[in-house]
């Protein structure tokens, strides 16, 4: 995903919101954070292959979850966070006997540093020990199955997050936008790890629904 143009827009928006914050939360307070994203897409495409024309069906499901805890020092907030992003893709044909399922999972903990007020939350996340795992399954109508699995240890990874919470009782709920980038230099499979010919990078922007709780 091309995200270079989003950086200046994202940073400018974050800076303007920080300047407009009027009130800050009480000092020395623990704040927990939960954000979620779900998206599902189904497609059907006709494939022309002479006498074996068939309908190709694909389904992609994206599920994102992050859970964090930060210690607010009015207005700086430092803490820990765990993120997991699953992308499941299923492909199969009406005349074929095989369904291919692929699960790509990004996951890992991170250190957070940011700003927290009564309504505005902005922070950066640096990930350590994160990874991208890809599992593929070939399932046939006769019951046979095959699978492959590879893992990419994250060389470096970060997120930039900006959210706005509307107060509902003792909870704040609202939208959160995150930009995440992971860089990989190695791949692991069959019990061994080898260097990639060149560094690879995955970037994605996710709108989420977030909850903030004062502890």
Image (cartoon, grey):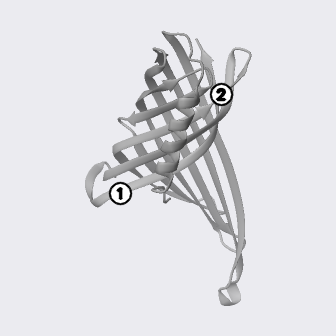
Q: Is residue 188 visible?
A: no
- Please give the residue where the numbered disc 1 appears in the rendered image: 200
Residue plotted at (48% across, 43% down): 11
Residue plotted at (44% across, 24% down): 80
Counting every numbered tag in the picture gives 2
Can you tell which mark lies on residue 55?
none
Where residue 92 sits in the image (x, y, percent)?
Answer: 65, 66
- In the image, is 64 to the left or to the right of 108? right
In the rendered image, the residue lying farthest to the bottom is 50
Residue plotted at (52% across, 49% down): 9
- In the image, is 158 to the left or to the right of 85? left
Tell which circle, 2 or 1, labels the residue nearer the N-terminal end: 2
Image marks 2 and 1: residues in contact by CB distance under 8 Å: no
| 129 to 91, vertically: above or below | above
The residue closer to the viewer here, 39 or 105, is: 39
Q: Quadrant of residue 170?
A: top right
Q: Helix or strand or loop: what does disc 1 sit on?
A: strand
C-alpha distance separating marks 2 and 1? 35 Å
Can you tell which mark lies on residue 165?
2
Label 1 crowd (10 A; few <14 / some 14-19 / many >=20): some
- In the image, is 187 to the left or to the right of 177? left
In front: mark 2 or mark 1? 2
Residue plotted at (53% across, 23% down): 116
Where residue 147 sits in the image (x, y, percent)?
Answer: 49, 56
- In the image, is 47 to the left or to the right of 28? right
Q: Quadrant of residue 66?
A: top right
Q: Quadrant of residue 196?
A: bottom left
Label 2 crowd (10 A; few <14 / some 14-19 / many >=20): many
Where residue 149 sits in the image (x, y, percent)?
Answer: 43, 52
The residue closer to the viewer here, 196 or 2, is: 2
- Which of the image's four quarters has the C terminus? top right
């Amino acid at each position: 995903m091309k995200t270079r143009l989003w950086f200046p827009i994202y940073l400018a928006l974050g800076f303007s919101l920080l300047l407009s914050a009027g009130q800050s939360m009480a000092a020395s307070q623990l704040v927990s954070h939960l954000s979620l994203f779900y998206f599902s897409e189904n497609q059907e495409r006709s494939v022309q292959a002479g006498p074996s024309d068939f309908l190709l069906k694909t389904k992609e499901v994206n599920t994102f979850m992050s859970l964090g805890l930060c210690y607010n020092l009015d207005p700086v907030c430092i803490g820990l966070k765990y993120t997991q992003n699953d992308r499941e893709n299923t492909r199969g044909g009406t005349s074929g006997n095989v369904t291919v399922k692929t699960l790509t999972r990004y996951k890992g903990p991170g250190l957070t540093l940011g700003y927290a007020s009564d309504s505005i939350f902005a922070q950066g996340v640096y990930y350590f020990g994160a990874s991208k795992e890809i599992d593929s399954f070939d399932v046939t109508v006769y019951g046979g199955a095959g699978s492959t699995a590879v893992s990419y240890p994250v060389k470096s990874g970060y997120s930039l997050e900006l959210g706005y919470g509307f107060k509902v009782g003792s909870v704040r709920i609202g939208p959160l936008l995150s930009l995440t980038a992971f860089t990989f230099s190695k791949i692991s499979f069959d019990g061994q790890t080898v260097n990639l010919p060149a560094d690879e990078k995955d970037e994605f922007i996710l709108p989420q629904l977030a909850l903030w709780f004062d502890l």
